[in-house]
Image (cartoon, rainbow, N blue to C red):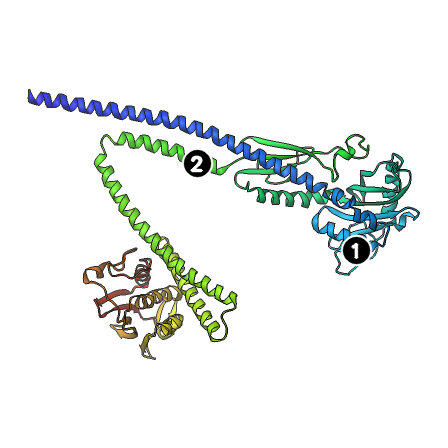
Amino acid sequence: MKTRDRLILTRVMATSLAVGACVSLALVFGVGYRVLREWRTTADSLARHQAEESASLLSTALLRDMRGVQESVLTSSRLLTFVRQLPYDVRNEAAGAFARYPYPESFFLWRRGTPAEAMMFFDRGGRRPAWMDSPEDRTPAPVLVESQSRVATLLLARIAKDVERRRTVSVFETSISGDAYQVVAQLVYNDVVGDDLEAVVGFTVNLPWVRRNYFPELTEQVSRIAGTRGAASLTVLDERGAHVAGPMTPANGDTVRRPFALLFVDPLLVASDPPRDLPTRKWSISVAVEDPTLTTAIGIANRALAVAAFATAALTFGLVLSVRAARANARLSEMRSDFVSAVTHEIKTPIASIRAIGDTIVSGRASGSVLVECAHLLVQESKRLTRLVDNLLAYSRITDVTEAYAFEPMNVAALVDETIEGFAWQLRDLQFVVQVDISPDLPSIRGDRTALRLAFDNLVDNAIRYSADLRELKVTATVVNGCVELAVADRGVGIRSDELPLVTRRFFRGRGARAGGSGLGLTITQRIVSDHNGTLTVSSVVGSGTTMRVTLPQAERS
């Protein structure tokens, strides 16, 4: 009876657990799906709203810029005064307009009572019109004052029609030397009714040029200012829907369009009485919602929902494993956190020093010997930061690519001298006693110079870092059993005997470790030495110092 009761109880518990797991799974799927759907709707709405704002921003910027020359230059009181004076004042106005607006190719000025060939053209110094057949002015000036009777006659003949209609602004399109131009001219009258024409001042716009250059550059600038890169694509299309500026790849989402007229003048000036020779070009701005961040977030949310459902089902039979995995993950997270914290501290310290030194130099407080000392400190901190970055890069390299070395014969004494020289200022500043004992006839070794230099840098850096009151550094190199043995010894704090086997493990830092350090130096050194068919041994006595010995094979004699 008791056995039966146990079986029944077991079945009931198993059934209850299964039902509970199924209900939990259904709830996770149901709630997660609803939350995801509502979040997706909200995100789409926000993305579309952002696209509409971007379209409005670009259209407003385009319209304001396209009519800027007509509104702020042609109608300015200064320019209307200058048209009755010498052309040099007009040239200054033209230079200012060229600097602010890229689309005018040239300005022109004609006064009543003068022939057509007397019309003056103020051309860009760096973008001279192709139809200007007069000898090119080689003077490096932003504005060139020139004449062109053929083009002047063409323009005045067309402007005369608008003078007859008493218009204050003449806007039309014409062909000059095979290129389509839009011409905007301000008609200056001496009376209110428009019977007494005084002068004509205007500008020309090369339409093929603005299509190739002006709209792509302006679209790029507005996109950068609006911060829409990666969230929406801004595209300018012509009246036929052909691409003009912006990305050509179609988007996989809603598209917001804003039409605008290809007019370099206020559209209201020609809306009531449009000229017949001014084609109606209805271009448009297309902003397509294609936020990759949104797509990525949705994918992450879907995967998170699946993982949550799987975790709920696996909870019925994997509770113990989940607890163990959680503990292991916590230990790994703690180790990574310690590593990130240590590396962050190591990077911030030299950066802060470099910044402080730079501030001192910029402020002018450093001069003479102090300036030299600042320069030495700057070099020292730069080398320290470089060594840390090299360690991180080397760690990535030896983790993924174990054969990325360029072997060559090397002189050990020269390699040691380079290493000691790299720490010269630091050793001198900390008042280290340095002894280097290397026989001049020591045989060469074969290895990768960059890798071995990094390994020896780590050994010397450790010796400096963990030295206490007795600041001594001794480097020796001898031949032992046909190999070259290089030893780096210090009189520092030493390493506990139970920690000696662990010092070459990644991220390991002993209980007596000083502040700073990433826990990668000896790991990288061990791997580099191993890849060179050598060995690294560590001997240490707490309170007396540490000796690091690197044994490497001799280079084969040729």
Could you say which quadrant of the image residue 321 lies in?
Answer: top left
Residue under label 2, please give it: 297
Give the percent coordinates (x, y) of residue 508: 27, 56
Q: Amino acid at mark 2?
A: Ala
Residue under label 1, please give it: 144
Local secondary structure at mark 1: strand
Is there CB contact under 8 Å for labels 2 and 1? no
Is disc 2 surrounded by few (<14), some (14 to 19) or many (20+) residues within 10 Å? few
Q: Residue at x 18, y 24 (%)?
A: 13
Question: Compared to 192, does 387 lie above or below?
Answer: below
Question: Compared to 146, does 320 lie above or below?
Answer: above
Q: Earlier in the sequence, mark 2 or mark 1?
A: 1
Is disc 1 surrounded by few (<14), some (14 to 19) or many (20+) residues within 10 Å? many
In-front residue for pair 198/141: 198
Q: Amino acid at mark 1?
A: Leu
Give the percent coordinates (x, y) of residue 517: 33, 59
What is the residue that sits farthest to the bottom in this orientation? 440
Does residue 226 appear to the left or right of 97 in the view shown?
Answer: left
Local secondary structure at mark 2: helix
Does residue 126 appear to the left or right of 305 in the view shown?
Answer: right
Quadrant occupied by the C terminus: bottom left
In-front residue for pair 21/480: 21
Quadrant occupied by the N terminus: top left
Q: CA distance from mark 2 to mark 1?
A: 56 Å
Q: Is residue 403 visible?
A: no
Total tally of numbered discs in the picture? 2
Question: Compared to 336, does 254 lie above or below?
Answer: above
Could you say which quadrant of the image residue 444 lies in?
Answer: bottom left
Question: Compared to 454, does 43 lie above or below?
Answer: above
